[in-house]
Image: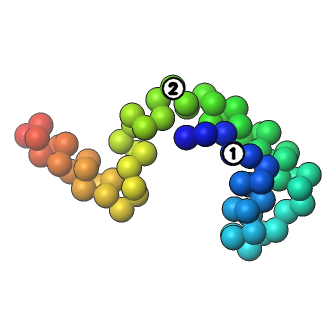
Amino acid sequence: MTRPSPKAIHAMADVAGVPVSAEVATRIANSIGPAFEGFAAVAGTLPFDLEPATFLVVQAAARSKKA
């Protein structure tokens, strides 16, 4: 999980159908960047990082092992 760049924000906004200016993309990247940096220490270690379609399957397997 890396801090998103203004270029990445701009591309995601375009794909979502909400085009933004370069200035707005920079402001968005600067505002959400600290959150990404805060989670960098645990990135890849949380079950939620799994692909969403398999999240419930993994959680159900973990519960069945406890039973």
Please give the name of the residue rendered at 69% of the width and 62% of the height, measured from the top-left corner. Answer: 12
- Residue 63 position, x and y percent, is 17, 43
Which residue is drawn at the image coordinates 69% and 70% (left, top)? 15
In the image: residue 54, left or right of residue 12: left
Return the mark for residue 37: none
Q: Is residue 16 above or below residue 65?
A: below
Label 1 Cα neighbours within 10 Å, binned few <14 / some 14-19 / many ≥20 = some
Residue under the point 55% across and 30% down: 40
Occupied quadrant, residue 8: bottom right
The reply, left or right, for residue 41 in relation to residue 46 is right
Q: Which residue is found at the position 60% from the left and 28% from the top?
A: 38
Q: Which residue is mark 1?
A: 4
User: How was this image coloured?
Assistant: rainbow
Image quadrant for the C terminus? top left
Give coordinates of residue 28: x percent, y percent. Answer: 79, 47
Between residues 52 and 2, which one lies in front from this camera angle? 2
Q: Residue furthest bottom?
A: 17
Q: Is residue 14 left or right of residue 23?
A: left
Question: Closest to the observer: 27 or 64?
Answer: 27
Estimate the spatial distance between the alpha carbons at disc 2 and disc 1, rounded to whole Å.
Answer: 16 Å
State the quadrant of the N terminus. top right
Tag 2 residue: 41
Compare marks 2 and 1 and give the one earlier in the sequence: 1
Residue 33: image x %, image y %? 71, 37
Disc 2 on helix, strand or loop?
helix
Dot 2: few (<14), some (14–19), or many (≥20) neighbours within 10 Å? few
Task: Name the amino acid type tagged 1.
Answer: Pro
Please, what is the three-letter code of the amino acid marked with disc 2? Ala
